[in-house]
Amino acid sequence: MSFFGFGQSAEIEIYLDGQESRKTAEVKTEDGKKERLLLYYDGETVSGKVNISLKKPGSKLEHQGIKIEFIGQIEMFYDRGNHHEFISLVKELARPGDMIAHTSYPFEFSCVEKPFEVYTGANVRLRYYLKVTIIRRLADIVKELDIAVHTLSSYPEMNNSIKMEVGIEDCLHIEFEYNKSKYHLKDVIVGKIYFLLVRIKIKHMEIAIIKKETTGTGPNTFTENETIAKYEIMDGAPVRGESIPIRVFLAGYELTPTMRDINKKFSVRYFLNLVLMDTEDRRYFKQQEITLWRKGDKVRKPNLQSPAILAGTQTLENTAPQEDDQEKTEPAQKEDFLRAPNSQSNDKLNASDPFDQRISSPTESPPESQIQNMTREAGDGQNDPENTE
């Protein structure tokens, strides 16, 4: 509203070229709602026109210049005063002067580098937007328009399966196997769990997909865990030699690609969490990290005039080199379990069971390798008897 001649005397509209036919993507807002934004990829040109209309026909708008900016920005919700811009491009649309009629200004940001995917999480937001500013002496007139950006990855050359033996010393040994370590967002996780030694009374077993968002550095690091999905994969007591199949469809969940150290500000990682519960409601879990990546719907022809667009399709080997080094030397891992604190079974366990001396499994590991520890979940079994180990 204009008061004594002050206030916004013009309206700004940003029109993007081809917006009627361009794909859109659903993006979560800060308040948890969703909005559909026009979708762009790394290296694509962002162009269109800015339409400025005067609210009062025949009036005059004095300004000190008109500009449009393309901004890529990371916002920390706990530090809203500081916005971290990793892209900032500016185009001047008009020099200082007077506007006496509706005016349209074309703009083009050619072959714009967009290295990261849009993301809204619990503590951080990464966004791309166009910002038009009419510079005035008292108060600028500003209009913003957000766009969505997806990062596509090529199919990973190295995608070994995950095999590991876990359990509790002298009580439980299981071997789990997942068919891959890297999954695209519409993929299916296929695996199995093989029971090698069962001496505790297991009530049920479940598998969960957990998203772990880490922001900040050093003492100012914040970690937020979110359970994306949870499945019960077994109900009842298993016996030695039993095999439990796993099949988890990812397409129905709100997942993003794995993000590692984005602009040294935040990371988003995903884990498969295997949880067992015994008859005394004590829970044991083991987490295994997986890598998620976005697969394009179709192969896009590279723009030969733009070397930047060739970088738009990332390789997973470049985004996670440390994983490949591990995969090359990872047959089936074995890790030795110590009995979890405050965890006791009523079963009388024989310390020298012949089965403990040699474990036969579908994927036998070298005898010198160790079995990995399964963690007792904090807060369970509070009425357990005193630990006598």
Image: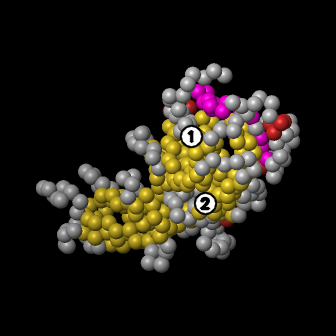
Three-letter code for the amino acid on which mark 2 is drawn: Val
**Foreground disc of the pair 2, 1:** 1
Q: Residue furthest bottom?
A: 21
Q: Pointer 2: what residue?
A: 248
Q: Nearer the viewer, residue 329 or 171?
A: 171
Image-quadrant location for residue 187: bottom right
Q: Residue at x 83, y 36 (%)?
A: 354
Vertical relation: 184 (above or below) 346: below
Residue 68 is at least partly visible in this image:
no
First reached walking from the N terminus: tag 2 or tag 1:
2
Q: Nearer the viewer, residue 191 or 43?
A: 191
Q: Residue at x 39, y 54 (%)?
A: 32
Image-quadrant location for residue 217: top right
Q: Which residues are magenta?
A: 331-347
Q: Between marks 2 and 1, how big is the CA–CA gap?
A: 26 Å
Residue 328 location, x and y as percent? 81, 49
Q: Pointer 1: what residue?
A: 279
